[in-house]
Every structure is written in structure tokens, then in C-alpha cells.
Amino acid sequence: MRINHHKHSAVKPGRPGSELFPDSPLGEQVQGIPTGRDVAWEPLVDYRRNGVSETTIHGAVAWAHGDEVIHSFGGNVLCYGRSMMKPFMLKAFVEELADLSWEQKAISVASHNGDTEHVSAAQSLLSESEWPLMLTPLDVPLIQFGRQVRRPRRWYHTCSGEHAAILRGCREKGWNRAGYTLPSHQVFEAYMTQIRRFIGEDWTPQRIAKDGCGLPTVSNTVAELAQIYAGLVRDKDEDWIWEAMVRHPDLVGGFNRLDSTILKAGEGAVIAKEGADGLLGLAIEHPDYPKGLGIVIKIAHGWNAQATWYVARAILGVLGIDLRNPYPLHRQKAFIVPGIVPERYIKELETIPTWDEWDPDQDRWMYDAEMDL
């Protein structure tokens, strides 16, 4: 079903630019998978300067209580789970890696900044003789402070901890480690088994693609991803994934990273994991949701930590979890679209400010400047 875009432009009829925006076949390679303008995104947060909207961030949000999707806003968008799914990839190795230190367990599910502590923890998963088996792309640290690293290395890649843990897990299982990034390898088969635990044994992905780090990533709807994340809550005490992320949040991401900050703010009741191109997964232990609450945010235009932070703060806030505001905008204010939360939370949402009380009101003068015109 296609969205009706039949709206005329601001240009007078007959002038160049007045016609409807044409449909484009660009990227339309798979029938039945909407692309471009046919994806039903909705505005999630609006940046305004003195009441005028300057930036509107579109996306999709889904809430799942156990197996039941209880709220969806922005359409049930089909996307790839990307690095947001690392906790589930590592579930295939929870027994084999049970004897690791908590730091090693945390780095195995990380999308880290590439700091010294991240690289050290990732390298400790393998003996030096095993390092050549790593197939992460050459990269520099994701976020750098002070002296800049210019020589790319595999260990700096944000997924190096996951790759090292998978290689160690394969060794313990007795699996051939050659080709561990291929969808024909046992690693991918074990990962699919974990996903099907949460969304059904008969589930099959529409597409399988190569992620940025070289491992397979599969397509899921935003609602399916929320259901999968609700499963993390139910599995909380069944393996080490939850505790490792809560014990060492700064290894999961790093300084000022959204998922690391949420892990600390949640005080053990929330698991958060970022994914490339605008994904954030939340698994929340909450008394109102005994089957586990999973929430997934997908930003339409790709990763935008500040916009996702505003949306996450609002969602967590209505659930009684206090996440601080992100660093302030430049003479703008953020306004949250109420549709990101179920109707029962709308009133509560109105009480959560998107700017701090001590922030100066810098987007306007303290008088009506328009009156002087």
C-alpha cells in the first residue's frame, strides 16, 4: 500500500517545480519492501527557534509487553537490527563464555568508542597468536579525545569485542573459525535460533545483508525488534548478558554514549543498546509489565544521538526512570511528539522538560522584537 503524496508545491501551477514529486525506481529492488517516500515515518521530535520549527526528526517507535505489541508510532518499519542485536548474537555462546571476567563479557556485546580500556578488554579475549583470525575492518577509534589516532587497526573497530568473543566461543564449541562472518557458518545459524525463541520458530527474515563489521544482519520490523528486546527482560537471570552490561556500562559504549548513560541511569532496571543508522533498543524491568517491556526507537535519517536522547528521555521519564537531558541545542528548544508513548502516558509526558531549568532562554529576546517592525 502506497502513501498518498498528492500535495501541490508552493510554486504556482505550470511553473517549474510545481509538479508532484515523481516516484523513483532507485533502490526498489525487492517487491513488497517499501523504500524512500513509501516508508510511513512520523515526526518524533521537533527543534524550534522562538516557536518556528527548524528541524523535525522523523522515525518510528514500538513498545512490546512480552509477545504483545502494545504501541506503535511511525509505522511498522522494516529495518536491519545492526549492532543493537549483539546481546542476542552472544546468547549463542553464554555457556562457552561463562568463565570470562565481567569486563570481557561486557566488551563482547559492545559497540565501543575504541578507547584504551576497550581495546585492552577486547584483546584479552584471544591469545596473540589468534589475533590474525579477526575479520573486523580496519578502523580508527569511533570517538577520539586528545591526540588523534590516524593508523587504522582492527582492534579500534567498534565491533572488535564481539568478533573476538565469537572467535573464542567458536574455539570452545569446536567450530571451524574460518568463515565465521558468513551466513553459512554455524554462528549465524545459532543466532537465528536465538531470534526465533522470541518471535516464533517459523520466522524467516525477508533479507540478510552484510553489516558494517562484516557479520550478517537480518531484516526485522520495529515491532519484532521490540518483542525481541522484551525477551531480554525475561532472560535477565538466565545468563550473564544483563548483569555484564549493567556492571560495566562504559565498556558497552563509552564516554557520553547514549546507551552507556541509560545503563547507568536505569540502575539495573534497564538494558540499552545502540545500533547503527538510528537504532536504540531498550529492555525495561517494570512492575507494570511483568512479561518484560521492550521498546525500540528507529530514526529515519540515520544515527542522531541527540534526537534519540530526547526521545529516550521522554519514554524513560514516563516510566519513572530519570535520564538527564543531552547537551543543549544551539538557541533552539526540543518538543516531543506525544505519539511516542501510549495514550495512558500523555499527561505524564507533559511534565518532562526537554531543557534544563538553568538553561538560558537563548532562542529569543525578552521582548516582542516583531512589534518594532
Image (spheres, rainbow, N blue to C red):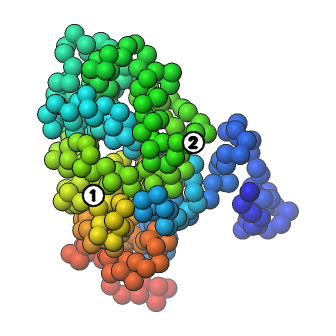
From the image, tell me which residue sits under label 2: 202
Considering depth in this image, is 364 or 146 the residue closer to the camera? 146
Q: Is residue 3 left or right of residue 255?
A: right
* Element carrying mark 1: strand
* Residue under label 1: 270
Q: Nearer the viewer, residue 245 or 322?
A: 245
- Residue at (29% x, 24% y) in the render: 169
Give the percent coordinates (x, y) of residue 75: 58, 60
Q: Residue at x 41, y 26 (%)?
A: 187
Q: In which quadrant of the rendered image does the N terminus lie?
A: bottom right
Percent position of residue 19, x then y: 80, 59
Q: CA distance from mark 1 to mark 2?
A: 29 Å
Position in image of residue 177 (x %, y %): 36, 15
Tell me the kind of residue under disc 2. Answer: Asp
Q: Callout 2: 10 Å neighbours few (<14), some, many (20+)?
A: few
Q: Is residue 108 visible?
A: yes
102 sits to left or right of 316 = left
The residue at 17%/31% (across/down) is: 100
- Tell me which label, 1 or 2, sits earlier in the chain: 2
Identity, as a three-letter code, of the amino acid under mark 1: Val
